């Protein structure tokens, strides 16, 4: 039955702003969907979406994109129709239908394709309504239903017709502020979900995955009876681990013998740690990642021969060789922070986006990802910090919390400079980045040395640097060390020169300026910045007032900042230290974090006044 579109109410036409999200540039008036099955037991989902443009910035929301899983023709999109209500030059209402010539379909990934279209005559006040049908090969494609969006949603509803003989488990994720309506209907074998008036969830700094905070319902197929042939799907984590270890695309790959492997380099290693390092670097140096995330491998032998593969190929090869080298290693399923947190209440396999190696040596655990070319052995990949991993083992499957309290994002700045009588500063500086601070910077430097140096000084417009030298690239334990000469002319106002001292700390822009926060603040790791700066002053420049020493501490003592300024004869010494000793803060702690950052930036941006006596 064809769904009519283009009927807009007077209330929708007159809508000027979203009452429950007044800053919104556009609003989804409704997103309604129904999932059912056809004679071939395909999963057929009909979508109907209506959205309105409220502000100029919202006009870009008229660029509609529908992503679908096209690999092996698993899913395709049909019956796409759209209509727009807009206005002509005389402010009269005009309706236009989508022209099929303006519909584009393209492959965006090995696994996914995208249909896109843009409606004509989009203006503030326009309403767009479109419908389409998604057809998947089977109910295995049943995905979570998201009630929330980056745009506010006035109504989101979903009706799921259960496949005959099938049993589904579902889990609802929502905050108490937003009620949900759930209506099972035994006669039709369906269940209906609905939520109303949900504010948009827009990107927030240090947010992690947005989907962790979206109101949603997850589904999992647990049982299926097809004419008396019963299939029981896994409903415990132990069962999932057992099945995965017998899966030909997963566990059986760990028993394959890889050809042409140069084992001699680690067979004579002096310790298990050295053996692990040699195997890890051997795989990283021999395999090229194709940038496709996967937990599986169709054949690690084929990938090894090609020296290229997806994430599953490469890390299952790594686990295979670590195991053959006699090390205690297991595959571990993980979900990177930007992929979303793992729900441990039910064995949803699809929530993991990667498999890595979990190695234990003398009670010390290591998490290795051979697709990551930069992270050294002693550090956990940054993308996995503050997540949970599931160790796949027939006898001892379990979850582990992935965190690292021993190492942090550590930056140390040293400046030795002097000022001349005209207020020009010249000196030398050393900036050292340790551990997690080093990883991304090293990758950027290797990618483009010229751009790296340009970006290094870009935040300081009046600053000139030369003789730029970088060391520590080839060492896992030494910092990434930058040595260079620096110079700049102090800003002058009347008889005063303004000496700034916030150089190379990375703290140039306060990230916490929003009034509210909805998501957890996830720094990934703990943080320390230390700066020691000495400035030799000429005879004509006099420090009128010595700035006060400052100590900032949050109520929970997890954030601390110091500033100490002293003067000995003609030398001005500035010592700074900023520490964040927790890697995560809840949304309820946002006010505390914001207040601390505001005070830190006020401190860092407070100039020192030097008066010219001549």
Image (tube, rainbow, N blue to C red):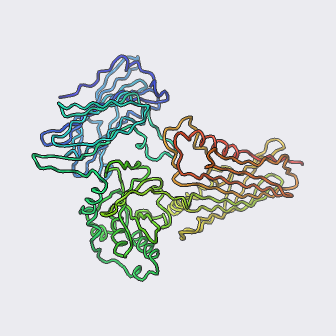
Given the current orientation, which residue lies at the most extreme left position? 227
Query: Which residue is found at the position 24% from the left and 63% from the top?
Result: 246
Q: Is residue 98 visible?
A: no
Please state which of residues 349 and 493 is positioned toward the viewer in this rendering.
349
**Placement of the N terminus among the 4 image quadrants:** top left
Residue furthest out toward the right: 614
Residue 245, image x, y percentages? 27, 63
Horizontal side of residue 289 vs 545, given as left or right: left
Relative to 166, does residue 454 appear above or below in the rendering? below
Residue 574 appears anywhere in the view: yes
Residue 445 percent across, percent down from the top left: 54, 61
Give the percent coordinates (x, y) of residue 452: 56, 58
Q: Residue 457: x and y, percent?
A: 63, 54
Q: How many marks?
A: 0
Q: In the image shown, does 531 or 80 lie closer to the viewer?
A: 531
In this picture, residue 375 sits left or right of residue 559: left
Q: Nearer the viewer, residue 87 or 360?
A: 360
Whether residue 222 is situated above or below residue 431 in the rendered picture: above
Q: Quadrant of residue 304?
A: bottom left
In which quadrant of the rendered view does residue 408 lie?
Answer: bottom right
Q: Answer left or right for 182 relative to 501.
A: left
Q: Quadrant of residue 196?
A: top left
- 411 left or right, relative to 565: left
């Amino acid at each position: 039955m064809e769904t009519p579109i283009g009927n807009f109410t007077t209330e929708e036409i007159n809508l000027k702003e979203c009452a429950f999200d007044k800053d919104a540039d556009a609003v989804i008036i409704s997103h309604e969907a129904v999932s059912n099955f056809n004679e071939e037991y395909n999963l057929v989902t009909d979508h109907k979406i209506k959205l309105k443009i409220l502000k100029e910035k919202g006009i870009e929301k008229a660029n509609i994109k529908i992503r679908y899983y096209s690999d092996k023709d698993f899913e395709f999109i049909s019956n796409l129709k759209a209509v727009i209500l807009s206005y002509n030059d005389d402010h009269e209402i005009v309706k236009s239908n989508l022209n099929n010539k303006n519909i584009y379909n393209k492959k965006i990934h090995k696994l996914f394709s995208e249909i896109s279209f843009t409606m004509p005559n989009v203006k503030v006040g326009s309403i767009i309504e479109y419908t389409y049908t998604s057809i998947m090969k089977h109910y295995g494609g049943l995905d979570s239903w998201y009630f929330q969006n980056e745009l506010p949603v006035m109504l989101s509803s979903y009706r799921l017709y259960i496949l005959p003989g099938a049993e589904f488990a579902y889990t609802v994720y929502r905050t108490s502020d937003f009620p949900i309506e759930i209506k099972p209907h035994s006669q039709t074998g369906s269940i209906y979900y609905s939520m109303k008036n949900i504010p948009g969830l827009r990107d927030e700094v240090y947010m992690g995955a947005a989907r962790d905070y979206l109101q949603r319902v997850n589904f999992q197929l647990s049982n299926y009876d097809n004419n008396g042939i019963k299939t029981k799907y896994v409903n415990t984590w132990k069962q999932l681990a057992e099945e995965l270890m017998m899966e030909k695309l997963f566990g059986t790959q760990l028993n394959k013998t890889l050809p042409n492997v140069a084992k001699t380099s680690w067979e004579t290693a002096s310790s298990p740690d050295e053996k692990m390092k040699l195997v890890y670097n051997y795989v990283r140096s021999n395999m090229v990642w194709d940038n496709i995330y996967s937990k599986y491998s169709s054949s690690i032998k084929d990938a090894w021969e090609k020296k290229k593969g997806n994430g599953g190929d490469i890390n299952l090869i790594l686990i295979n060789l670590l195991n053959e080298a006699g090390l205690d290693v297991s595959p571990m399923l993980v979900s990177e922070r930007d992929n979303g947190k793992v729900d441990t209440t039910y064995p949803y396999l699809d929530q993991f986006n990667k498999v890595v190696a979990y190695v234990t040596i003398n009670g010390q655990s290591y998490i290795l990802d051979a697709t990551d070319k930069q992270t050294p052995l002693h550090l956990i990949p940054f993308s996995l910090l503050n997540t949970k991993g599931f160790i796949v083992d027939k006898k001892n499957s379990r979850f582990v919390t992935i965190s690292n309290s021993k190492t942090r994002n550590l930056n140390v700045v040293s400046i030795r400079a002097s000022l001349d009588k005209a207020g020009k500063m010249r000196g030398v500086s050393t900036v050292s980045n340790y551990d997690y601070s080093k990883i991304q910077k090293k990758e950027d430097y290797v990618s483009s040395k010229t751009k790296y140096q340009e970006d290094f000084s870009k935040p300081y417009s009046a600053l000139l640097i030369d003789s730029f030298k970088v060391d520590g690239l080839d060492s896992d334990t030494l910092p990434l060390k930058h040595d260079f000469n620096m110079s700049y002319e102090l800003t002058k106002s009347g008889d005063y020169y303004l000496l700034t001292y916030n150089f190379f700390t990375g703290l140039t822009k306060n990230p916490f300026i929003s009034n509210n926060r909805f998501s957890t603040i996830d720094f990934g790791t703990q943080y320390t910045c230390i700066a020691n700066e000495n400035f030799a002053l000429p005879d004509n420049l006099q420090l009128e007032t010595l700035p006060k020493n400052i100590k900032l501490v949050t109520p929970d003592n997890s954030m601390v900042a110091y500033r100490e300024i002293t003067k000995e004869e003609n030398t001005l010494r500035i010592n700074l230290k900023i520490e964040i000793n927790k890697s995560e803060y809840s949304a309820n702690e946002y006010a505390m974090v914001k207040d601390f950052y505001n005070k830190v930036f006020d401190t860092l941006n407070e100039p020192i006044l030097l008066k010219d006596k001549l």
